[in-house]
Amino acid sequence: MRQLKITKQVTNRETASLDKYLQEIGKVELITAEEEVELARRIKQGDQLALERLTKANLRFVVSVAKQYQNQGLTLPDLINEGNLGLIKAAQRFDETRGFKFISYAVWWIRQSILQALAEQSRIVRLPLNKIGSINKINKAFAKLEQDFEREPSAGEISELTEISEDDVKESMKSSGRHVSMDAPLVQGEENDMYDVLQSDDSPRPDATLLNDSLRREIERALKTLTQREADVIRLYFGLSGEHTMTLEEIGERFDLTRERVRQIKEKAIRRLKHTSRSKILKTYLG
């Protein structure tokens, strides 16, 4: 396979050529958690090859994030371009000593890069500059606290760190698109996670090679091993089956449950998915 260059121009192509790009990144070999840590250490020492390896291994993830921001003024290739820049920045700043997976940290940098591009270039999305600044500050605080606490921080905790009111934190997070914790693998020891199955129902799916019908069917079969409540929570939290992604609070409101109870149901469901009899089948798609 020819050398991929991870730059802003990497997907600056006509829509007809997007399939080719997606096929190329689909061939890039994934990395293990151990390799991820080693690459992060080398990046700190200025190793450009390590930076390239870590970013290439996660280009598919950027596509999944970019798809969530379609139809807001930028084409999918442009959104991927911007997301790739955020991915590179995340790779340069990642602290592997925290014990978190890289992509759990990188999601905020990817989103931030895309949101800035939408604010600057989109004719549809126009946020005040002070609001963009608040969103960026909140995003950075979220990423930091998530690594510190090893869980999603609350709006109150973000407010305390940023000195932005809790109400403004909640409003800014709505404006920026909520954080989706994608650090929970579908199967034991698997490096891919729920983000790989996100899809946009409002637009064509050029990345069918990455998110195919067979995989979605297997995910649905795996969800059937859960209780109805567990499956419903997973679908809503990760935006599966055409549902919009929802926060723990929003899911709690729908089912008249506390945020903590919803979190417990979600974590239990994820543990069950890891050990489901269908995990080997899922692994053939996600491996």
Image (tube, grey):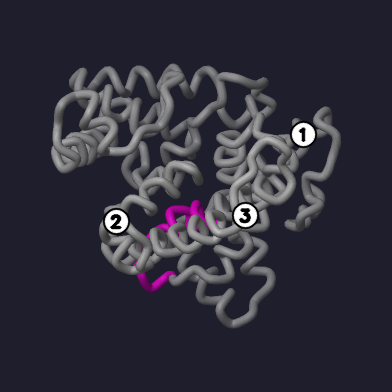
User: For residue 25, what is the image quadrant?
Assistant: top right
Residue 219 higher or lower than 238, as above or below: above
Name the residue carrying label 1.
Answer: 18
Residue 56 place in picture, x, y as percent: 65, 54
- Residue 217 in view, yes or no: yes
What type of secondary structure mainly makes up the magenta span?
helix
Name the residue carrying label 2.
Answer: 153
What residue is drawn where x is 46% and y is 58%? 139
Local packing at callout 3 (Cα closer than 10 Å; few below 14, some 14-19, many 20+) is many
Q: Could you tell me how far apart the alpha carbons at marks 1 and 2 are, in whole angstroms?
A: 36 Å
Indicate which disc, 1 or 2, sits on the residue closer to the N terminus.
1
What residue is drawn where x is 46% and y is 21%? 216
Q: Which residue lies furthest to the bottom in this view?
A: 45
| Residue interval drawn in magenta | 96-109
Name the residue carrying label 3.
Answer: 113
SS type, badge 2: loop
* Amino acid type at image mark 2: Pro
Residue 191 place in picture, x, y as percent: 44, 47
Disc 3 versus disc 1: nearer the observer: 3
* Amino acid type at image mark 3: Ser
What residue is drawn where x is 23% and y is 36%? 266
- Residue 275 in view, yes or no: no
221 left or right of 25 in image? left
User: For residue 247, what is the image quadrant?
Assistant: top left
